[in-house]
Image (cartoon, helix red, strand yellow):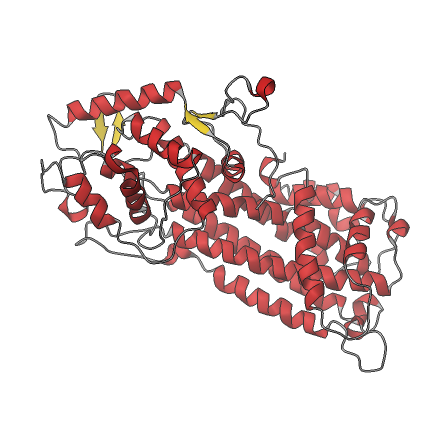
Amino acid sequence: MSRIRDGGGAAVLRAVAGEAHTGRVEPVEIVGMGLKPLDAVSLGQRRTPIRLGTAARERMAASSAAVAEIALHRPVYGRTTGVGANRDVLTSDPEHGARLLASHSTTGTTTYPKDVVRLGLLIRVNQLASGGSGLDPQVADAIVALLNEDDLPDLHRGGAIGTGDLGALAELGLALGEVIDGTSALPLLSSNAITLAECCLAYVEAATLINVVPLVGGLSHVALRGNAEVYDERVHAARPQPGQVRVARRMRGLLDDLPIAPARVQDPFGLRAFAQVLGPAVDHVDALGNALAIDINASAENPLVAGDTVLHNGNWHAMPIALALDSLRLSLHSVATLSTSRVANLVDPDFTGLSRFLASGSEASSGVMMIEYVAHDALASVRSTAQPATLGTATLSRGAEHHASFAPQAAVLTGSLLDALRDVLACELVTAVRAVRLAGLEPEKLAPAAIGPWLADALAALPDVLTDRSLRDDLEIARGLLTQWGDRQVEHPAEAG
């Protein structure tokens, strides 16, 4: 995936001096704070070399020394005790950590994609750099070496339910070798870093895709001769929901000065409620980005090393991330539903004044009739993957652990939903462009409205053959066009004001 802009995290990810003079890609310092999801994804995709910052190294060394001293005087979970229901079993076995890694590396058989692993390791280094784990900086250095040499271990799905990516991080611990000793296994595992990586990738995909929905909706508005007063600034000032206001502003930017008289006083919901339905999805993209920005920089370890003490806690629980993902998927389901409603309007001559199913040629031609079926097939996938993962429950380890967020499952569902949503939008795009063609509207006729150049793009990309044929290739072209349009967007919902 390449659909992100250069991040603005220079104050946080400080490039080592000299790059401008040597032309080499210099390492970027990981400092344990201020890392943005977009920056993290960008670093991972570009395989930018990194290094642990000096202050971060000092924090890690101090917390490592502190927890070693503390453990001489009081039990420290996972270091001098077992884990889970074995939390009350004390141990001084020097092989305790090795056994912990071996047992907890039990996973499923499906490997994580390498881009997820790479980003997950980067996030884990950034979390460790904040200094709350008690791990020696050599552990972070070892992970950095894997990243810089692109020597990524195979990590597997299975066993993560939003209470720490135990299995995958145990596999990472085994890959690190002797740098992990008997006291440092559990602190390495105490993280949702791999899940957060998958969430960051889904966040970028969602934020990018949601930015092209107004373009597709704008073309449907043109084809249906919609009434643009629904985007009037006064309408949205009267009910200033943040995302709704931003969507309306975007639509005004696309449709203002459109030289086409509206066909109706009041449009169907697909046009009339466009901002009110897409707006919450924009807000939920923001909420997910904010939640991720906190967690990828958090000292979410259990126990947390805080100065000269350790604090046993529940920061490993990924409920904020899981709820943000669930909320986003539910809002995107409504976006998809409204898209299929516009497809239904576009194939109906009562709304367009065009032929049934936008058919051309011999009588009883089917035109784009099958597009509706494909759209509702994709919508069914959106609907099934929109189900909240947080409705799940689990009681584990002899009752010691009786709740889970299922954030990893929510991340997988989000990725699947976004793929299906892209199919829904591709169906709308193909249908809207065909309606525009049949209506004889050309980009120049839409000037000075800003939607014109986007129509020109679509007309150039999609075949102009209107007789009955398979539209499979058209849909594939439309999917690619959505990606291209996402690449060209300047404004990112999670960063727009």
| Residue depicted at x 66% and y 41% | 246
Residue 291, picture quadrant: top left
Q: Is residue 60 left or right of residue 375?
A: left
Above or below, 34 against 453 in this view is: above
Which quadrant is the C terminus positioned in?
Answer: top right
The residue lying furthest to the bottom in this view is 364
Above or below, 14 against 489 in this view is: above
Q: Is residue 432 visible?
A: yes
| Residue depicted at x 70% and y 59% | 477
Above or below, 46 against 280 in this view is: above
Image spot of residue 171 (x, y percent) = 30, 46
Q: Is residue 461 left or right of residue 18?
A: right
Closest to the observer, 86 or 148: 148
Q: Is residue 24 left or right of residue 29?
A: right
Image spot of residue 85 (x, y percent) = 16, 48
Q: Is residue 238 visible?
A: no
How many marks do you count on the picture?
0
Residue 131, picture quadrant: top left
Image spot of residue 323 (x, y percent) = 43, 48
Q: Is residue 248 left or right of residue 256?
A: left
Image spot of residue 176 (x, y percent) = 30, 38
